[in-house]
Image: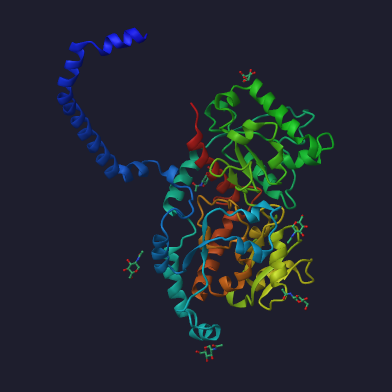
Amino acid sequence: MARLLSSITSFPPCRRNLSELKGLFWIPTGFLLGIYLFIFFHVSSTMKLVIRDHPHHTHFYITPKLSSSFNTITSIAANSSRKYAVQVYQPKNIEILHVNVSEPPLIITPGPEIIVTTKRSDVSRNNSERSRRGDQEITKGDELKNKQEDIFHDRNLFLEDYKEMNTSLKIFVYPHKPNDPFANVLLPYKFEPTGNYASESYFKKALMTSHFITNDPSEADLFFLPFSIASLRHDKRVGVGGIQNFIRDYIYKVSHEYPYWNRSGGADHFYVACHSIGKMAMEKAVEVRGNAIQLVCSSNYFLQGYVPHKDASVPQIWPRQGDPPKQQPSKRKKLAFYAGAMNSRVRESLVGLWRNDSEISVHQNRLKTPYHESLLGSKFCIHAKGFEVNTARIGDALYYGCVPVILADHYDLPFADTLNWKSFSVIVSTFDIPVLKKILKEIRFEEYISLQKNVMKVRNHFQWHTFAVDYDAFYMVMYELWLRRTTIRVY
Ligand SMILES: *[C@@H]1O[C@H](CO)[C@@H](O)[C@H](O)[C@H]1NC(C)=O
Ligand SMILES: *[C@@H]1O[C@H](CO)[C@@H](O)[C@H](O)[C@H]1NC(C)=O
Ligand SMILES: *[C@@H]1O[C@H](CO)[C@@H](O)[C@H](O)[C@H]1NC(C)=O
Ligand SMILES: *[C@@H]1O[C@H](CO)[C@@H](O)[C@H](O)[C@H]1NC(C)=O
Ligand SMILES: *[C@@H]1O[C@H](CO)[C@@H](O)[C@H](O)[C@H]1NC(C)=O
Ligand SMILES: *[C@@H]1O[C@H](CO)[C@@H](O)[C@H](O)[C@H]1NC(C)=O
């Protein structure tokens, strides 16, 4: 080998030819460089066009770019109605809250976050002055605000897409025999949805009576895995301990009896679960967790198991009949309200810090007065994470026209790729519980009116119906599914 190499390198004619070619080398290189630059400029000048051709890929809600410089953020914020500041959390903050390392969701907040600051020197008007000025000015400010802050990120895109979804989306549901021993946990939708996890049953009920269902798997965009985590949990033959095996066996069956699972590794399959036990349910069926679309209420993107954009967040909503009541913002005397069990550090710190406050009303016990009176009598209603990021409180607040304050870090909020949560809620980092009152008090009255009006506009998207109604929670979930089917279609 060494001899061969030396004979090649010492071959004189070859060396001479190479040195002569060196000059010529620059001609094709320069030519290629020119082409490369041309392509580069062409691509960058037409980039917008390319992106516009694929709206679904840019449609997802993306949090502000934190990588952009501090200056950019502050200069944009300076002209918007609220001021923002970048706050890098130091261990100091952790001490303030007495947070323990044993609870990961609070301790780990990597990098900077954007919070609403509370300094507003330009707002000197007080409440009595506001009410004296009457409605006229409020309406003006409101119109202005509504132009800026729609409840949708992009209303036109949504409406256009929605129509297409409504006419084209097709779902195949894996069937089972009526005498299947587990018929009770497969599609148990024939009862009235009740309780905290009603969203799951409502979705199934509405799906099975909808026009999205197809009996022809070849025309299906998506395949529904109809097991109910909640029913499995209560079934004595399965129970909490047996759910994982059940799911593993179910997927085995589906992947052996039908060709569709193997075709995509499960990527065009979905299931729905509102109870957070669903998180553990897929441990022995890793393909479900990794590939399938998980429609879940406990959409915590901090913990392993939920993947934003692949999976989708379903709102947890307490079932309610009839039209929601109306209450004028001026009749909402309390600043903020919270009541609930003390099952998380967030709740402990919220109640611990604000329980004696005259304006923020927080309770760790069941209230003596009816729950809905507090929801109707408060400007803001606090959703504080418990065991999980999700509770029915956001749905409660919206139903009663109360602006939700979300104290649940890492919560992938329902329909966040479609709805602009900032326009109808206040999202507060759990580190800011000590300054919660300041944050809420410095939201200007006009801003509050805008938030509250948007709450009224958005609440039809957070209502379930036994027979789905356009744009209700069911259709919104279908829309989320439709967005996902465009990105995972497998041929
Ligand atoms: C903010 O407003 C000022 C004056 O109205 C303008 O000069 C500046 O460019 C605006 N900044 C941004 C980021 O829009
Ligand atoms: C932190 O956790 C340890 C061990 O669980 C406990 O002894 C301690 O009291 C906790 N500290 C706080 C501030 O909760
Ligand atoms: C509120 O504004 C009114 C009218 O401008 C003024 O008379 C009153 O003193 C103010 N109250 C407070 C608490 O600043
Ligand atoms: C969606 O489809 C249903 C059933 O065909 C129809 O009744 C409804 O009007 C459609 N909604 C929209 C917004 O097109
Ligand atoms: C799907 O893949 C599994 C594992 O490779 C295989 O055992 C099974 O037969 C396949 N199913 C079908 C329907 O071909
Ligand atoms: C609230 O009031 C109780 C009883 O007066 C007192 O023990 C507690 O320290 C107060 N808590 C706060 C956060 O002010």
Left of 183 or right of it: where is 156? left
Instruction: Please name the residue shown 75% across and 69% down the image.
Output: 370
Indicate how the structure is coloured in the image: rainbow
Foreground pick, 237 / 432: 432
Q: Residue 78's image quarter?
A: bottom left
Measured along the vertical axis of the image, is residue 402 above or below residue 282?
below
- In this view of the protein, can residue 463 be seen by the observer? yes
Measured along the vertical axis of the image, is residue 353 above or below residue 358?
above
Instruction: Please name the residue shown 42% across and 52% down the image.
Output: 156
Foreground pick, 143 / 170: 143
Instruction: Please name the residue shown 65% across and 64% down the image.
Output: 95
**Numbered disc total:** 0
Measured along the vertical axis of the image, is residue 481 above or below residue 87?
above
Quadrant position of the N terminus in the picture: top left
Instruction: Please name the residue shown 54% across and 25% down the image.
Output: 218
Q: Residue 436's image quarter?
A: bottom right
x and y, in percent, of residue 358 in the image: 68, 78
x and y, in percent, of residue 32 in the image: 22, 30
- In this view of the protein, can residue 405 be seen by the observer? no
Left of 187 or right of it: where is 491? left
Left of 410 or right of it: where is 281? right
* Residue placed furthest toward the right: 236
For ligand 2, the image quadrant comes to bottom right
Q: Residue 220's image quarter?
A: top right
x and y, in percent, of residue 4 in the image: 32, 8
Foreground pick, 338 / 436: 436
x and y, in percent, of residue 150 in the image: 46, 60
